[in-house]
Image (cartoon, rainbow, N blue to C red):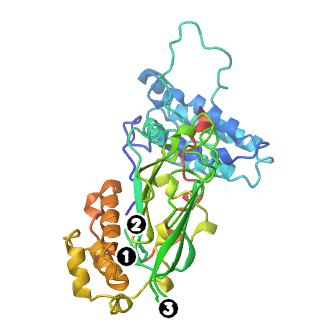
Amino acid sequence: MGDSSRSPGSWSPHGSLPLLSTLTLLLLLCGHAHSQCKILRCNAEYVSSTLSLRGGGSPGALGRGGAGRGGGLGSGGLCRALRSYALCTRRTARTCRGDLAFHSAVHGIEDLMIQHNCSRQGPTAPPPPRGPALPGAGPGPPSPDPCDYEAHFSRLHGRSPGFLHCASFGDPHVRSFYHHFHTCRVQGAWPLLDNDFLFVQATSSPVASGANATTTRKLTIIFKNMQECIDQKVYQAEVDNLPAAFEDGSINGGDRPGGSSLSIKTTNPGNHVEIQAAYIGTTIVIRQTAGQLSFSIKVAEDVARAFSAEQDLQLCVGGCPPSQQLSRLERSRRGAITLDTARQLCKEGLPVEDAYFQSCVFDVSISGDPNFTAAAQAALEDARAFLPDLEKLHLFPSDAGPPLSLATFPGPFLSGLFVLWFCIQ
């Protein structure tokens, strides 16, 4: 669930892993490379030497490259480029020791050479041409805005990116990226998201003295500094204080060239805020209803997965820890109004008795406040707008699976599985 699928190979008739997807994998985390480490130069030279394999060169040029040991069409050219890439990484290994981008590239090269049957010994690619373009050479295709995630992803992969959805509302109830739906007792500050690009923290307190049920009273969102796109921006909302600006008073990502790729707006001041982060393919909606804050996000898969083992506690990734989940018995206890009355109130706006309906019944019953129906209805509408697969819109108890662990994510994806296209601009 939520795992991206690979598209068929676009440059090889044998259905090999797409070259451009491979380039994406090898350029992971390049923005984090140390200044003295030359891995960025190796990355750039590899990209330059494989330009003709992206479909821009003639089929004859690909065929004349020869094949590796059993490689398909164009494998010879790719093998030469990979051997040059490997040589470059060896030359800069001493200064790149401990650099995650460097080690990611080394492992990626090894995997590609095995996949394409490339021998370790053999000719390498010629150095990339330097200097001005040859006379008469036409301009290349226009490059999309480097701070437009969707445009860059589509250019590299030939398809639209995948997205994930998470929400927290009411008690709070948490819908994770992977369709777990938990009613939680979390009290105090808990991270909803904690990755290389975003940090979202929800602070909750009991709905009444001695109650297990809590509601979110404060949300803190940090959009981390990102190259030419944005300065670091912090958004903070509290009950009865839902500003339509970041903490520094701005409504965008700052003065960098891509500053407009982060924006904040409201259509209902004090009750609804929407933050668009186009540079990471993310939309966030924050609402205030019935004295609590609701959070909803649509985020690119690669962004959501860009975290390390130390960032494993994220409610949007694994749901609430078992110790923080309210049991069915706790959820069925008598509240301020009867369950039958709560069901009638919730049924008006939530005709399907799914997880959203059950959450509404619990919140209205415990609090005695019919306004909690609006929180559940808004969460359902956000899911309808944000989910890529509407078959997953309505969740029922049988849909909930075991909490995810870090084992769900392959090692190379645990940190920095996000395409930092700026390295090849």
**From the viewer's perspective, is the residue at label 3 or at label 1 nearer?**
3
Quarter holding the C terminus?
A: top right
Amino acid tagged 2: Tyr
The residue wearing badge 3 is 210
Mark 1: give few (<14), some (14-19) or many (20+) Cα within 10 Å.
Answer: few
The residue wearing badge 1 is 401
Q: Quadrant of residue 384?
A: bottom left
Coordinates of residue 369 in the picture (x, y in percent) = 34, 78
Which residue is painted at 50% across and 35% down in the image?
A: 75
Amino acid tagged 1: Gly
Label 1: which secondary element: loop
* Precedes in sequence: disc 3 or disc 1: 3
Coordinates of residue 295 in the picture (x, y in percent) = 44, 63
Amino acid tagged 3: Gly
Question: Mark on residue 178?
Answer: 2
Which residue is painted at 75% across and 55% down in the image?
A: 98
Residue 102 visible, this orientation: yes
Distance, label 1 to label 2, CA atoms, is 9 Å
Residue 70 visible, this orientation: no
Residue closest to the eye, 198 or 72: 198
Which residue is painted at 47% across and 82% down in the image?
A: 185
Q: Are marks 1 and 2 in contact (CB under 8 Å)?
A: yes
